[in-house]
Amino acid sequence: MSIVIQLDTITKVYETGGVQVRALRGVSLSILAGEFVAIRGSSGSGKSTLMNILGCLDRPTTGIYILDGQDVSRLNKTELAHLRNRKLGFVFQGFNLLKRQSAIENVELPLVYSGMTSRARRAQAMAMLDLVGLSDRASHRPNQLSGGQQQRVAIARALVNRPDILFADEPTGNLDSSTSLEIMAEFERLNRELGQTIVMVTHDPAIADHAFRQITVRDGQVESDTSLTPEGLLTMADSEVLNA
């Protein structure tokens, strides 16, 4: 599998009231196409800053970020926006659906400026709703859908542009435990059946356990990087030694 994300000594420093805050301190990692990765960490660990940089929503202070072979570390805002639209999909904790629009209209939104005909946009949006099992709710507005259904609509919207990488930021944060399991099962299915690359940020260890690789961030650095092999054995990518 090819490397789709490569970070080399990434730092991020914010200026707050004349004080420098070092959110990331030399993060280096790589992610392969088709991986399902969870980035874990407590509040203030730097995981959200890392997600923003990975998703091209922010730029690093220093370091190199190669996304699918392109150095994006120095791209300006317009270039980053264009890259996001072409290669990345996003699912957020708050769903971010337009309340007055139907499910299918919400899913269509990323395609509005794609140059596609309205018929083609509608067909592609319906295909994505069918993918997440909601084609029968296409005409429903968000207030007519459960929380889990709203998040499925958000997933369909994130996938409608067929992104190389799907980013999910606390995707179960507003859901109960039962619905959270349903959404995580959906991510697992997308990864397993479609080979969708997924990078998810979560503070919840139980949610992170659904991913096949877990990166733990602490004090702006990668504390551990753990993968689950096809045989189900735990391997430590950071060369930590497991006790027998």
Image: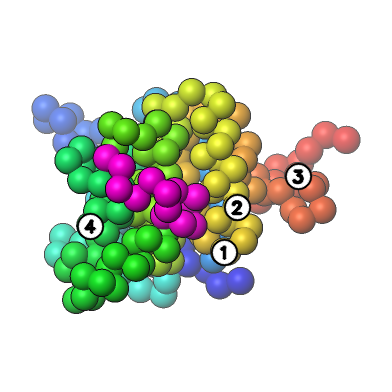
Q: Label 4's element?
A: helix
Q: Quadrant of the C terminus?
A: top right
- The residue pinned by badge 1 equals 194
- Residue 15 vs 54, above or below: the answer is above
Instruction: Confirm or deny contact between disc 4 and disc 1 (CB under 8 A).
Output: no
**Residue 31 relative to residue 151: left or right:** right
**Residue 180 relative to residue 155: left or right:** right
Precedes in sequence: disc 3 or disc 4: 4
- The residue pinned by badge 2 equals 189
Alpha-carbon distance for marks 2 and 1?
A: 8 Å
Instruction: Confirm or deny contact between disc 3 and disc 4 (CB under 8 A).
Output: no
Q: Nearer the viewer, mark 1 or mark 3?
A: 1
Q: Nearer the viewer, mark 3 or mark 4?
A: 4
Of the residues shown, which amino acid type is indicated by label 4? Leu
Q: Nearer the viewer, mark 3 or mark 2?
A: 2
Q: Which residues are magenta?
A: 129-141
**Can you give x and y, in whole percent of width and height, for residue 9 in the image?**
41, 54
Alpha-carbon distance for marks 4 and 2?
A: 24 Å
Precedes in sequence: disc 4 or disc 2: 4
View extreme (left): residue: 17
- The residue pinned by badge 4 equals 109
Precedes in sequence: disc 2 or disc 1: 2
- The residue pinned by badge 3 equals 234
Say which of 213 and 10 sits in front: 213
Q: Label 1's element?
A: helix
**Residue 37 relative to residue 240: left or right:** left
Of the residues shown, which amino acid type is indicated by label 1? Leu
Alpha-carbon distance for marks 4 and 1?
A: 23 Å
Q: Residues within 10 Å of mark 4 (few under 14, many from 20)?
A: some
Precedes in sequence: disc 3 or disc 2: 2
View extreme (right): residue: 244
Of the residues shown, which amino acid type is indicated by label 2? Arg
